[in-house]
Image (tube, rainbow, N blue to C red):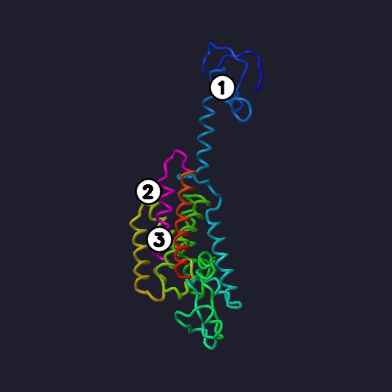
Amino acid sequence: MTELPTMACYRHPGVATGIVCTRCRRPICPACMVDAAVGFQCPECTKEGARQTRQDQLPYGGSVVRDPRLTTYVIVAINVVVYLISGVNGLADKLALAPRGMCLDATDPNSYYPGALQHACVAAGNHWVDGVASGAWWQVVTSVFTHLTLIHIALNMFSLIVIGPSIERVLGRARFLAIYAVSGLAGSAFVMWLTNPESSTVGASGAIFGLMGALLLLAYKAKGNYQQVLIIIGVNIAYTVLNVGTISWQGHFGGLLGGIVATWLVAWAPRKNRAAVQWVALAAEAVICVALIAVRAAQLA
């Protein structure tokens, strides 16, 4: 607050005052002044400040980021690092998602013994690879960052670079990461329930399908060209179906569903207490995915 010689309020000329707005320096009376971080402000400056603050917020409550590509590039970098080191000492087997675990033939690592129990596998001199049900719980996460071939990681990372920044630009970094993570977790849950328990699954495709679902809902919400996104998703679904056996349709469909649900929770959350509603809802979806994985792991164990 700044004390000045008696002046007239700029909004109420008949009211004397010695107070000025700390932003525009116009005289304001007690009826007009609004508490600010420093001193008082007039109603117009208060509204302008609120408008500028809202400009720093994105449509669904996220914060504007300087470079909406940064998060995507970090995710790509993590995937590349994991790909480069996954061939070391069978690390890929430890990172891939195996619902139950499997017994690999000691003389031929490409062959395994269906239905073999861990203790019998080891006793016979073969190699047991842990799965989620036998304690390798980290696989539901690490498998989303693991790729076995160059073409696999190249296609997934290209798709991520194309889709990711557009979503982060609308949702902000935290919500973008949350949707990516929940989509990957949902894909892992579908793999746990719907694949051969002794199979092994890797790849970021489930999380990327989740981003496709997010892009579809955001385009629809903004009354944009969501039909084009539908075509892209349709082409990817067709490719997945035509390559069942070599592509994890379980991870793809699980990720797509997880991403659609997560984005709906974010984009359609009520304005009142929006952030709290969004984060509680996203946490609930993640907990449901983890619970489904835990139940299936207990069955297989």
Q: Is residue 273 above or below residue 99?
A: above
Q: Which residues are magenta?
A: 250-274
Where disc 1 sits, the SS reads: loop
Q: Check whether the beta carbons of the residues at disc 1 and disc 2 lie within 8 A of each other.
A: no
Q: Mostly what secondary structure, the magenta segment?
A: helix
Of badges 3 and 2, the one in the foreground is 3
The label shown at residue 221 is: 2
In reply to whether residue 269 is colored magenta, the answer given is: yes
Where disc 3 sits, the SS reads: helix
Whole-number angstrom distance, CA of label 3 to CA of label 1: 52 Å
Query: x, y percentage for residue 104?
Result: 51, 82
Between 221 and 126, the one lying in front of the other is: 126
Query: x, y percentage for residue 91?
Result: 58, 74
Residue 18 picture quarter: top right
Q: Earlier in the sequence, mark 1 or mark 2?
A: 1
Q: Amino acid at mark 2?
A: Lys
Q: Earlier in the sequence, mark 3 or mark 2?
A: 2
**At 61% from the left edge and 21% from the top edge, which residue is drawn?**
20
Query: x, y percentage for residue 37?
Result: 62, 30
Between 50 and 105, the one lying in front of the other is: 105
**At 35% from the left edge and 53% from the top edge, which residue is drawn?**
225
Q: Earlier in the sequence, mark 3 or mark 1?
A: 1
Pointer 1: what residue? 33
Query: Are there few (<14), some (14-19), or many (20+) residues within 10 Å of tag 2?
Result: few
Where disc 2 sits, the SS reads: helix
Q: Amino acid at mark 1?
A: Met
Pointer 3: what residue? 256
User: Which residue lies most toward the bottom here?
Assistant: 107
